[in-house]
Amino acid sequence: MTTLTRRGFLAVSAATSASLILPARAWAASDVLSLRATTRVLDIGGRAATVKGAVNAAGGIGLVLDPGQRFRVDLTNELAENTIIHWHGQIPPNAQDGVPDIPMSAIVPGETRSYDFAARPGTHWMHSHIAVQEMELLAAPLIVRTPEDVAADRQEVVLFLHDFSFRPAAEVLAEILGGEAMEGMAGMDMGNMQGMDMGNMQGMDMAGMDMSNMQGMTGMAPGMEMDLNDFNFDAYLANDRTLDDPEVVQVDKGGRVLIRVINAAAATVFWIDTGSLPGRLVAVDGELVKPLPGSRFGVAMGQRLDIEVDVPGDGGAFPILALREGARERTGVILATPGAAVTRIAGLADSEYPAFSGDLTQEAALRAVNPLPERAPVSQPMLMLGGSMMPYVWTINGQTWGSHIPVTAKSGERVEITFHNMSMMGHPMHLHGHAFQVVGIGGNRFSGAVRDTVHVAPMSMVTVAVDAGEAARWMLHCHHMPHLASGMMTEFSVSA
């Protein structure tokens, strides 16, 4: 039995306020938060690793905003290469969204760029929108607290998850894209989508279609198996650490804890296991849901979960673990009351964990506390998700980015987008600049969670409703970084 010391993780900052990107130093220094895109050194399993990060003025990563504060930030690029940061879960003016050249160019080394917009409350995060840099851990939490958070008698803990390789991220990505990580899988057809022209699907109106016969698509056909993991990373991190030296967070006996889970991994879906502490899922992607009880909840790349747990009055040490789907690896933090003995936990379980919700059971159980108002959609486009392992190419409607077919809408219109996954890999689909509501799985309609990233399981269909916002080009893509890098991105093109 080994007692571990507690080490702090998220440095708390303050502030932010107005609208487009403004010249740096446009405001008094005391009004503005600072962030640096820079390098940092982590101790991972006793081995030093140089990674990237979004570092705040206190030297920690990420930002915490108080209720009512605007996102008012000066971001300085201290890297030796261009970068740009996307504020995942926020709804900024399009010029501040953080995608290279859509519409703003990347930030060159030494440049400071200023951001100013109203912050959307909840558990969110920030990350480079250059795939290889996100794999180099250029990402951080972005927590915007509400008055209810401040008033609640509970402690808040951030659980920020990564997958990590000691090899250069560009080399790892090139290996995956080159198919070398798929040895033995040559010729596997992932839905037979690659050669198909799906362009005519874009304008398909599904309003009169009988979708009831699609219900079975949310399950696997006999003999079909999901492909869960493209690459075996060297380490899986929670708050920059492995279970060799986990963060131990001191909590009160009999206290309530809100765990803000952020899956910042490039290509790993996790189960969040609260162990002996019964949990309640109370928010996803920063939006409240009707409490869903349980002790194990799935979280795909780009998604966030807010989970409440109650610490027993007699105290103790309570691991909160992130379990890699379809594998034995795990990571996590430990909640411990004063004086509790903390037992070291192995980074490998005795057996593999199951796949995450191939039938989307968890998603189907979620109900929004603040659903979108009922409206008839103006259009109902279907996006076919497909691709292949060798060559490693992932597509939307048979197209990759550059030859993509935009989803179109006018500002203010209600659109219902159906993601139809014809592949044997899951795709967490993220829409920039908007929150949408899950309104259907297969043929079942329901008032599901409000989100910005939805996991579309293999051979499943998920329908989301979205009200088109600012007239601009907004990215819509898979948040599995190698899938994105191979072309699995389109755009939500909103006109005035």
Image (cartoon, rainbow, N blue to C red):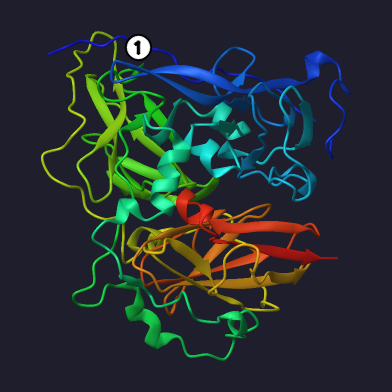
Q: Determine which quarter of the picture holds residue 307.
A: top left
Count numbered badges in the picture.
1
Residue at image location 42% in from the left, 18% down from the top: 42
Residue at image location 65% in from the left, 30% down from the top: 81
Asked whether, in this view, residue 357 is left or right of residue 417, the answer is left
Q: Give the residue type that dot 1 points to.
A: Arg
| Residue 213 vs residue 169, the one in the foreground | 169
Tell me the residue that label 1 is attached to: 6
Asked whether, in this view, residue 486 is left or right of residue 44, the answer is right
| Residue 30 in view of the camera | yes
| Residue 355 vs residue 286, the one in the foreground | 355
Residue at image location 51% in from the left, 29% down from the top: 152
Q: Determine which quarter of the picture holds residue 63.
A: top right
Q: In the rendering, at what x and y percent does residue 411 appear?
A: 79, 65
Q: Secondary structure at mark 1?
A: loop
Q: Determine which quarter of the picture holds residue 276.
A: top left
Q: In the rendering, at what x and y percent does residue 177 appear?
A: 43, 53
| Residue 307 vs residue 166, the one in the foreground | 166
Asked whether, in this view, residue 41 is left or right of residue 253, the answer is right
Q: Is residue 153 above or below residue 372?
A: above
